[in-house]
C-alpha cells in the first residue's frame, strides 16, 4: 500500500525543547487529516524521531515539508519568547 517513506531523527539541542516540540506536534499526528499519509512521532531525549509513510512521493514530500516547517516554527517561537525574558 505505501509507496514512499521517510524517517528522520532531529537533534534539537535539549530534552526540554524536544518535549515542547513533541507535545506541539502531537495533535497533528493524532488527527492525521489525510488518509494518504501516516505519521509516527517519538521522543528520545533531545531527539525527535519522525516516520512518515505515504501512497505517493508527492504526498510524502508535502508531509515532510509540513512537519519540518512546524518543528522550525515551534523552535523559532520558543527562541523569540525566551529572548524577551527580563
Image: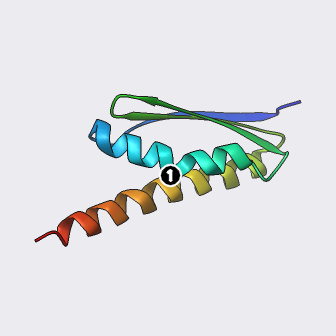
Q: Residue at x 50, y 52 (%)?
A: 24
Above or below, 6 against 35 in this view is above
Farthest-out residue, top: 44
Q: Position of residue 29 (x, y in %)?
A: 65, 44
Q: Residue at x 39, y 41 (%)?
A: 19
What residue is disc 1 on?
Answer: 24
- Quadrant (top left/top right/bottom left/bottom right) for the N terminus: top right
What crowding class fits label 1: few (fewer than 14 Cα within 10 Å), some (14-19), or many (20 or more)?
Answer: some
Is residue 4 or residue 69 the one in the foreground?
69
Q: Position of residue 73 (x, y in %)?
A: 44, 62
Is residue 32 or residue 1 the one in the foreground?
32
Q: Is residue 78 left or right of residue 36?
A: left
Picture quadrant where residue 44 is located: top left
Q: Residue at x 33, y 34 (%)?
A: 46
Q: Is residue 51 left or right of residue 37?
A: left
Q: Position of residue 76 (x, y in %)?
A: 35, 63
Q: Is residue 75 left or right of residue 55?
A: left
- Quadrant (top left/top right/bottom left/bottom right) for the C terminus: bottom left
Q: Residue at x 69, y 43 (%)?
A: 30
Amino acid at each position: 500500500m505505501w509507496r514512499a517513506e521517510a524517517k528522520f531523527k532531529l537533534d534539537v539541542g535539549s530534552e526540554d525543547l524536544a518535549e515542547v516540540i513533541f507535545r506541539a506536534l502531537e495533535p497533528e499526528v493524532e488527527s492525521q487529516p489525510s488518509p494518504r499519509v501516516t505519521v509516527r512521532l517519538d521522543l528520545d531525549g533531545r531527539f525527535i524521531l519522525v516516520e512518515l509513510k505515504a501512497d505517493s512521493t508527492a504526498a510524502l514530500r508535502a508531509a515532510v515539508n509540513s512537519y519540518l516547517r512546524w518543528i522550525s516554527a515551534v523552535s523559532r517561537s520558543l527562541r523569540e519568547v525566551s529572548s524577551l525574558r527580563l
